[in-house]
Amino acid sequence: MRTVSILGSTGSIGHSTLEVLPELADTHRVTSLVAHSNAAKIVAQARQVRPQVIGLADPAAALRAERDLSREGIEVLSGPDVAVQVLRATRPDLVVAAITGAAGLPASLEAVQGGAVLALANKEALVMAGRQLTHLARAHHASIVPVDSEHSAIFQALHGEDPAGVRRLILTASGGPFLDLPPERFASITPDMALRHPTWKMGRKISIDSATMMNKALEIVEACWLFAVAPDAVDVLIHPQSIVHSMVEFVDGSILAQMGVPCMTVPVRYALSYPRRAPTASRYFDAARFATLTFAEPDRERFPALALGHHVARQGGLAGTVLNAANEVAVAWFLEGRTSFNAITETAARVLDRMENASEPSLERIVAADSWARAEAERCLRNNS
Ligand code: NDP
Ligand code: MG
């Protein structure tokens, strides 16, 4: 039996994970769940999967959950570092890291230091502190298995391959809801428009990232850390149908692609059962229904965020931390209706321009750079400069 902790259980990836786990009931048992403040949902989940411990970052929500679960023998923890507390209390074999944003980093670091398999959806942790996370994973014999669909595809295509035979990683991108929107209409994009993704149903932050294509920028950096490749060996290709989840090109001219329905249960199932493959009760991919698969170069002028991915991956040091933090702040402002869609990428680019970099920064410097970039982004957004 492998024990599993789901960090971010009430979110979109958490939901997909809980959908897959009944298929793995013979081999996997959930021992903890963590969320931010959605007490009603985590209590319902806890009644279903019967973990030992649940955690809510928000103390008031934790009190509500504790009251609801008082007779059920499930411990409730709380506080800003609740995910780390829960991992220390339960020491799971496998951690599904599906907290959004930089808030997920401490728990991912804790998971690898505990030698767990880290099923990583929280790409922001790698963008922010990829060197620390991958070094610690190696030092503690922990493995990182990507949940992000593109990286799961590449991970699968690379399985058993000699890294020397790899020429290029090709990340596919749906292009998001504004793939064909004329540039003059970008200024009037509202949060509602941006939240309507054509092929994936996801949490709010990543939906906005997909609309700006900042998501693909973050994924370029994520790929560099996960697969130890140079930034120039990572390319992006628009593929609106989201059937080919990504590809690896080898030096002999072969390309291996992983395909499937655009549904996160597939990469989640793979990450949970890796290195095995577990059968599923849900629908299989019917290639005949997708007679047309198209691929195109991205429009880098309409989606300037894309260039920031390669820029940051080449810069290294604190650049990923700064890009991620500035983007998180700008996305929050946009979702609150306080700034325009275009301001998200503009803000990220401005803050990156003003940063002071450092090579191989310590975790303390990373945390300081994250705070600096958040404050600088706020300043840019307030002054619109
Ligand atoms: P959601 O917004 O749907 O869910 C986020 C989850 O994290 C919720 O359970 C939320 O709890 C919890 N959470 C947020 N902040 C904290 C905190 N400080 N402490 C504890 N828990 C917290 O996001 P998604 O599921 O869409 O995305 C999660 C991660 O996975 C992101 O990093 C995203 O980039 C990545 N990802 C997502 C994909 C998708 O299809 N959704 C695809 C690929 C990657 P609460 O509900 O209480 O607020
Ligand atoms: Mg992805």
Image (cartoon, rainbow, N blue to C red):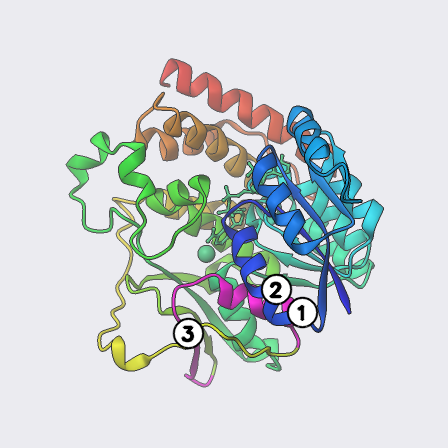
Circle 1/circle 3 CB separation < 8 Å:
no
Q: Which mark is residue 330?
A: none
The quarter in which the N terminus is drawn is bottom right
- Judging depth in this view, the residue of 199 and 176 nearest the camera is 199
Question: What residue is at 56 percent from the left and 76 percent from the top?
Answer: 158
Mark 2 — residue? Answer: 21
Residue 301 at what x, y percent from top left?
A: 26, 45
- Does 252 appear above or below 42? below
Question: What residue is at 39 percent from the left and 64 percent from the top?
Answer: 262
Q: Amino acid at mark 1?
A: Ala
Q: Secondary structure at mark 1?
A: loop
Q: Which mark is residue 25?
A: 1
Residue 317 showing in the rendered view: no
Cβ of mark 2 under 8 Å from ligand 1: the answer is no
User: Marks 1 and 2, Cα distance to the nearest angstrom?
Assistant: 6 Å
* Mark 2 crowdedness (10 Å alpha carbons): few <14, some 14-19, many ≥20: many
Residue 294 at what x, y percent from top left?
A: 25, 69
Q: Amino acid at mark 3?
A: Arg
Q: Quadrant of ligand 1?
A: top right
Q: Secondary structure at mark 3?
A: loop
- Does 277 appear above or below 128? below
Mark 3 — residue? Answer: 283
Q: Quadrant of residue 145?
A: bottom right
Q: Quadrant of residue 79?
A: top right
The quarter in which the C terminus is drawn is top left
Instruction: Indicate which disc, 1 or 3, sits on the residue closer to the N terminus.
Output: 1
User: Marks 1 and 3, Cα distance to the nearest angstrom?
Assistant: 19 Å
Q: Amino acid at mark 2?
A: Leu
Question: What residue is at 71 percent from the left and 31 percent from the top?
Answer: 67
- Judging depth in this view, the residue of 232 and 35 nearest the camera is 35
Residue 30 showing in the rendered view: yes
